[in-house]
Image: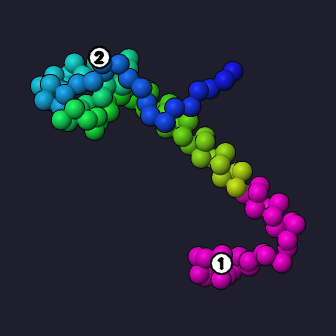
Amino acid sequence: MVTKIVDKPTFTRDQLIPSAVASKNFGKVRKLAQSSPQYITDNGVVDTVVMGYEQFESMYQRLRELEEREEARLLESRLERLEKNPETAVPWRKVQRTGRTDE
């Protein structure tokens, strides 16, 4: 399975809602947002996104998973580097005291 990565989200014209319209029809915007995100515009520029909570929760969970993977990758990389060059180790007490590893 190939995942296409895009720089910005894409949306249809139907998902663009001027802020004045959104404020007068917020109930309708909320209902539409349950099936697909709604992009609120101000002077023609998207500045707010309204989405259903399930979609938000799914997106948030995915972000947490990616952050955890990245943390694990960084830790593994640092441990490999430390195994190769043990003299670069910084005592934990020093890190705790100063909060820095580069001193």
Say which residue label 1 marks. 102
- Residue in the image at 61% along x and 76% along y: 100
Check if mark 1's residue and mark 2's residue have beta carbons within 8 Å. no
Residue 19: image location, x then y, percent: 18, 31
**Percent coordinates x, y for residue 84 in the rendering:** 87, 66
Mark 2 burial class by Cα count in 10 Å: few <14, some 14-19, many 20+: few
Classify 10 Å Cα crowding around label 1: few (below 14), some (14-19), many (20 and above).
Answer: few
Residue depicted at 81% across the width and 64% down the height: 81
Give the vertical position of 33 relative to 93 (above or below): above
Left or right, 76 with respect to 15, comes to right
Say which amino acid is labelled 2: Asp
Q: Main secondary structure of the magenta part?
A: helix
Q: Nearer the viewer, residue 97 or 69?
A: 69
Residue 99: say if magenta.
yes
Horizontal side of 67 relative to 37 (left or right) equals: right
Residue drawn at the location 20% of the way across and 22% of the way down: 27
- Reading the image, the residue beneath label 2 is 14
State the extent of the magenta-drawn residues as a range. Answer: 75-103
- Amino acid bearing label 1: Asp
Which secondary structure lies at badge 1? loop
Q: Is residue 22 visible?
A: yes
Location of the C terminus (image quadrant): bottom right
Q: Quadrant of residue 38?
A: top left
